[in-house]
Amino acid sequence: MDSISEIFTTYNCINLDDRIQFDLDGVVEKEIKQTYCVENLEFCISCMDYTTLKLTDTEDSVKNFVIELLKKLKKFNLKGVAAVCVFPNFAEVVREVLQSTEIQTAVVAGNFPNSQTFTEIKLAECKMAIAAGAQEVDVVISVGDMLEKNYEKVYRELKAIRKVCENVRLKVILETGELKDVETIFYASLIAAYAGADFIKTSTGKVPVNATPESVYVMCEALKQYYAQTGKRVGLKIAGGVSKAQNAIRYLTIVNHVLGSEWLTPSYFRIGASQLIEDVIKDIKALKMKAE
């Protein structure tokens, strides 16, 4: 394969800023009104990575977190979320509670959320998490190296992580709020895709600026161009501050607008959240009552 920098020359993010604002302010806002329905709200739940990443998490609290989720799904007759996402040391606990379901066990690894350690330690943590039962692994890109345009270094590390995660789903967190500009987010998306990521993900939820409509649009555009050139479909996970049903529907609408309905499946679309499910359930109930 050519170097990452050479590959970038075959992609185009020029004038993307103008297109983003035109689409978000005009087309997408109109489409959201049509998209807001019970079916799509239930779909958002089925695409959810139900997450707890608290400093105070323990084996007992995480176990209860999963048990309460299962009770909630049963109570409201919902199919289930896509995954439960926790710190890697809780993978075994989660996997055990979820064993009678199709819900995946996901973890954050690779020195989440900062990604500031030796690559060997990141690889070791990923391996240990998988050995403990993780079926999906979320890792953070090296943000500092992206900002300094050390693209080959970022690519090589992600390739090494991909290798140790070859039998699980790998999601690469770009931390878009720290990457700042359209071009850097666009290139980070491509680097992760070429390194073999199954998903690219907006944010850790641990920085001041997390998921935004603008950053999601850029990531969608990068994945659209990547698919056009390679024929490979990479998923998108939105995370960080998505706590309201309206926000979830907005992101679903952006993905559908840019990438198309082929991406609207838990295999290619995820929402990472800890509080969203309550607001979605509330809106589902309200829409059903309105329809009666």
Image (tube, grey):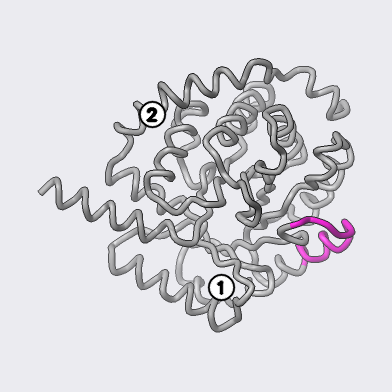
**Can you tell which mark lies on residue 193?**
none
- Please give the range of residues in magenta: 114-127
Residue at x 65% of width, y 53% of height: 207
Residue that extends furthest to the left in the rendered view of this protein: 292
Instruction: Answer above or below: position of 191 versus 238.
Output: above
Looking at the rendered image, the disc whose residue lies closer to the viewer, 1 or 2, is 2
Kindly indicate the quadrant of the structure image that contains residue 69: bottom left
202 lies left or right of 43: right
Q: Is residue 225 above or below residue 33?
A: above
Q: Residue furthest front?
A: 208
Residue at 21 percent across and 52 percent down: it is: 286
Residue underneath mark 1: 94
Q: Is residue 40 above or below residue 105?
A: above
Q: Is residue 124 magenta?
A: yes
Give the side of residue 69 with respect to residue 20, left or right: left
Name the kind of residue labelled 1 in the image: Val
Q: CA distance from mark 1 to mark 2?
A: 38 Å
Find residue 261 and report its horizontal and vertical position in percent. Answer: 44, 32
Q: Please name the amino acid that badge 2 sits on.
A: Glu
As drawn, the label of residue 29 is: 2
Disc 2 crowd rating (10 Å Cα; few below 14, some 14-19, many 20+) is some
Residue that appears at 77% across and 49% down: 162
Q: Secondary structure at mark 1?
A: helix
